């Protein structure tokens, strides 16, 4: 159960953009959660704003005290300490509404889909273009974190949606990015 939290606030930095620091923080958290093999730590972004398409500068970690203390005992923030401010472990307000914070994936590039189809099916560029029209592309309006795939080293955007969730999802888990796999986090 996500009864406690720790806020990690990105500090302004003249050398690195906010987007770069947020991506680095998310990548470090992902590696730590993979190392812990944890499905009990979730994240939220209290300054998330759909209208401005921003995640904000605060990443909130949610979990039970043992899980959060175990995470913070790792040296996962090494190299980021000068760029962040941490709060102490604190209990989440009781009665706070529950939210689902999850990844959303979109078909955003017809050209990328065509190249993939050509590799997988051995088709020519014309065949792939006929099978995948430009109309499959979609403009995404969600905030995102830019990351690099650990396996392919290719950059990708991790689009995040935060929505009101059902109380019953509170006991379910989170993936290795701290995003919902049915789990909910308190919103405050």
Image (cartoon, grey):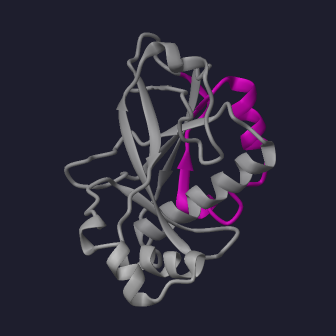
Is 124 rendered above or below residue 166?
Answer: below
Is 188 positioned to the left or the right of 116 in the image? left
Is 141 positioned to the left or the right of 179 in the image? left
Closer-to-camera residue (33/60): 33
Q: Is residue 2 visible?
A: yes
Closer-to-camera residue (111/61): 111
Residue at 67% in and 30% down: 40
Which residue is most to the top?
Answer: 95
| Percent coordinates x, y for residue 179 in the rendering | 54, 41
Name the image quarter holding residue 129: bottom left
| Percent coordinates x, y for residue 92 in the rendering | 51, 21
Range of the magenta residues? 62-91
Closer-to-camera residue (174/187): 174
Q: Quadrant of the N terminus?
A: top right
Magenta stretch encompasses residue 2:
no
Is 101 positioned to the left or the right of 47 in the image? right
Q: Quadrant of the C terminus?
A: top left
Residue at 71% in and 56% down: 31
Name the image quarter holding residue 70: top right
Magenta stretch encompasses residue 67:
yes
| Percent coordinates x, y for residue 122 in the rendering | 57, 83
Q: Is residue 14 visible?
A: no
Is 146 positioned to the left or the right of 150 in the image? left
| Percent coordinates x, y for residue 65 in the rendering | 69, 24
Residue at 22% in and 54% down: 52
- Count every numbered label the image shows and give the total: 0
Residue at 41% in and 27% down: 99
């Amino acid at each position: 159960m996500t009864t406690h939290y720790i806020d990690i606030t990105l500090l302004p930095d003249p050398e690195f953009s906010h987007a770069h620091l947020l991506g680095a923080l998310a990548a470090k958290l992902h590696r730590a959660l993979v190392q812990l093999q944890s499905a009990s730590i979730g994240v939220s972004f209290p300054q998330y704003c759909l209208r401005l398409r921003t995640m904000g500068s605060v990443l909130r970690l949610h979990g039970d005290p043992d899980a959060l203390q175990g995470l913070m005992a790792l040296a996962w923030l090494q190299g980021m300490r000068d760029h962040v401010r941490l709060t102490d472990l604190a209990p989440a307000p009781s009665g706070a509404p529950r939210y689902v914070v999850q990844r959303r994936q979109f078909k955003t590039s017809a050209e990328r889909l065509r190249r993939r189809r050509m590799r997988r099916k051995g088709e020519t560029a014309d065949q792939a273009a006929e099978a995948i029209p430009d109309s499959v592309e979609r403009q995404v309006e969600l905030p995102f974190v830019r990351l690099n795939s650990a396996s392919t080293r290719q950059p990708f955007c991790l689009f995040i949606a935060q929505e009101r969730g059902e109380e019953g999802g509170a006991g379910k888990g989170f993936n290795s990015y701290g995003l919902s796999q049915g789990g909910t986090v308190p919103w405050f």
